[in-house]
Amino acid sequence: MNVRCRIQRCIVALACSVILPASAAQILAADRPNILVVLADDLGYSDVSPFGGEMNTPALESMATNGVRMSNFYVAPRCSNTRASLLTGQQSHAVGLPNLAGDGTQLPKNHVFISEVLQQSGYHTYMSGKWHLGNTQNFGSVPDGHVRDPRVRGFDDYWGYTENHSQDNFQGSYRLLSDEVAERSYTTSGTSPGEPGTFYQTDAITDYTLDFLQHNRDKNASEGTDAPFFTYVAYGSPHFPLQARDEWVDPLVSRYEVGWDQIREDRLANMKSLGLIDPSVDLPQRGDVANTGHGEALHQIRAWDSLSSDRQDDLTRRMAIYAAMVERVDYNIGRILDNLEANGELDNTIVVFMSDNGADAEWHEYGFNAGETPRTGAALDSMGTTTNAVDEHIFLGSGWANASATPFRNYKHYTHEGGVKSPTIIQWNNGLNPSLAGQISNQVGDVRDLMPTLLALAGTEYPDEWTDLSGETYQTQALLTESLADYLTTGTAVDDRELGWEHEGNRAFRSGDWKLVSSNFGSTTGGAGINEWELYNLADDPTEANDLSDNPEFADKFAFMLAGYERWAYQNKVTGTLPWSAADFDRDGQLTTLDLEAFVSGWLDAAPVGSMETFAHGDVDLDGDTDVDDFILMRQAFELGGQGQLIAEFGASQGVPEPSSLVVAAGLLAGFHLFSRSSTSTEQRP
């Protein structure tokens, strides 16, 4: 970053420091924690050893021993959506990213990145690895900057790739964006044709991470300061293309010769012994191949023993490459943790490890290579380990992705558990409550929680407005998520909460232990069809095997969950209209005066913005106020439900004018106080 730009930001930080809340000042006076967020790419839930996998991941084992494993931590179904939520604390739709980000995508000015808030509050901020959040030019620029420049969004220094969703691991397009950290020198080819050089993406991401950490120390020493760091390490592994050095891959081949069916069984047994899964849970049947692209219809993943020996050998090596990539990520996490410990910084560093989504099944048992003849001989031996073009485009496929998601359903792209559940570990030696250290937590968490959680632990607050590097000041959206700060420091659980997802038509809504979910390809098992809703009680059925959507006993629960999803989708800008069913407060399938009374009575006494009760208590648009806008939304919902006349007559009977001005708010507040907060509903509306 240009020195002038750094000085400008220091001035802004100093100016803002005088208005920090008391809690922030107290933390500043003490020792504010460093923050390290490590994100793996397309890692399955059960791949790593702390979550039941057979892969050798000692660094993550160490984190699990000293930290807490979050067994119910959720992310988005796809990479850039999770990255947007991680950095903004928002559902990705709400920040203009319903699907995958392209290189030209520009996020709207309605949010702030956690890196920006922490930078302004005095943190040194660094990022290394995969960006995948599009063009940053609408937020301003830095001298000698780039069109996709993380420094514009609050990072002091950056190294990695800002183009596309992936790069070649041995070569590729990478850049250093910094004026204070020196560029490293690597070779991208060896002495013989196809032989890799010294460069390997995962190693290089870590090299620069260590350089940034040293930069923080040197800068503090030279300036006589003690600024903490926020470092975001976004590894590109094990995302395709599958590539790793031959010496890492060869020892792992024999491990996977047993095939994906046996690996699934072994992993489930491990998960049960670790306490991650209840002993009563059965291994579900193999998953589906949703989209082959090779003329095959939707079908169930084939049994390993049904494959030819050549195909088994081909697929075995693919999984060995994938495992080598995962183990290399762990090796490099170990490098970072060792570096922090050697410099006396580990104890006061909050370390968060997670994956951006479930394992990648694109799109066949054999990946994108489904149309190829299985590789044999020398072609098999060199798969994914050279810089030759034929070895640069290797994919995992749905068979092994199904094993990576053990015991859950589906994968990346989808909103069943296998697509959105992340193997997450949080370590903080100085601050984590001792009751959590070394434990497996069932606390429900979400990637969006990191924004309020880390800001609280850093002693700063989420701003209502933000001024970007272009000089424009704009309002930020409220955070519709939860902070886990108290949970991590006291061990006190956060109450049941609501989470929602939508991606490419795949939808889900979780409330407490219940989950409503649908997929855009249906199922081969005689269950739900394309875009048909399924209902599960995750407490009894964590693998989503027993669909209760057609069970009359749970009809009320189904309606409750469906209304919850529709409201969530509206609030998070997945849809632009509040469905009429969202106004059906007593869930009887029709809109009546009882529903209107339930809304209005709550409208008089709203809960605080952001709470689970907020919507039911009248603040429909979640802006923190119960005002005319909320009544108008309800009126629109009634009109969509064919009951526009009802709400008009109801308002007229109370002397309420048409909802076209703020007079409506005063009229309603004056006239509808007669309704009590009682409701005919037996269950609180989400």
Image: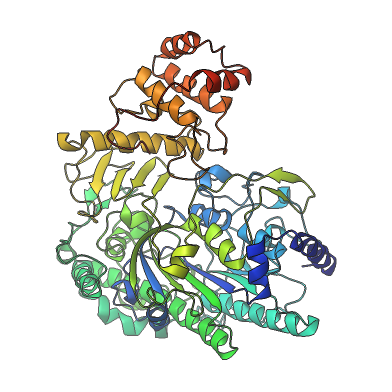
Find residue 564 and report its horizontal and vertical position in percent. Answer: 37, 37
456 left or right of 512 in image: right
Q: Residue at x 40, y 82 (%)?
A: 62
Residue 460 visible in the snapshot: yes
Residue 390 visible in the snapshot: no
Q: Where's the C terminus, which quadrant?
A: top left
- The chosen color scheme is rainbow
Find residue 680 and report its horizontal and vertical position in percent. Answer: 29, 27
Find residue 672 and report its horizontal and vertical position in percent. Answer: 48, 20
How many marks can you see?
A: 0
Residue 536 vs residue 686, the one in the foreground: 686
Q: Residue at x 39, y 18 (%)?
A: 641
Residue 477 vs residue 607, the one in the foreground: 607
Q: Residue furthest bottom?
A: 342
Q: Residue at x 44, y 78 (%)?
A: 330
Find residue 538 and report its horizontal and vertical position in percent. Answer: 25, 53
Residue 364 vs residue 476, the one in the foreground: 476
- The answer to whether residue 48 is above or below residue 152 is below
8 left or right of 506 in image: right
651 left or right of 402 in image: right
- The answer to whether residue 251 is above or below residue 480 is below
Image quadrant where residue 520 sits: top left
Residue 237 vs residue 357, the one in the foreground: 357
Q: Residue at x 36, y 49 (%)?
A: 414
Q: Where's the N terminus, which quadrant?
A: bottom right
- The answer to whether residue 562 is above or below residue 34 is above
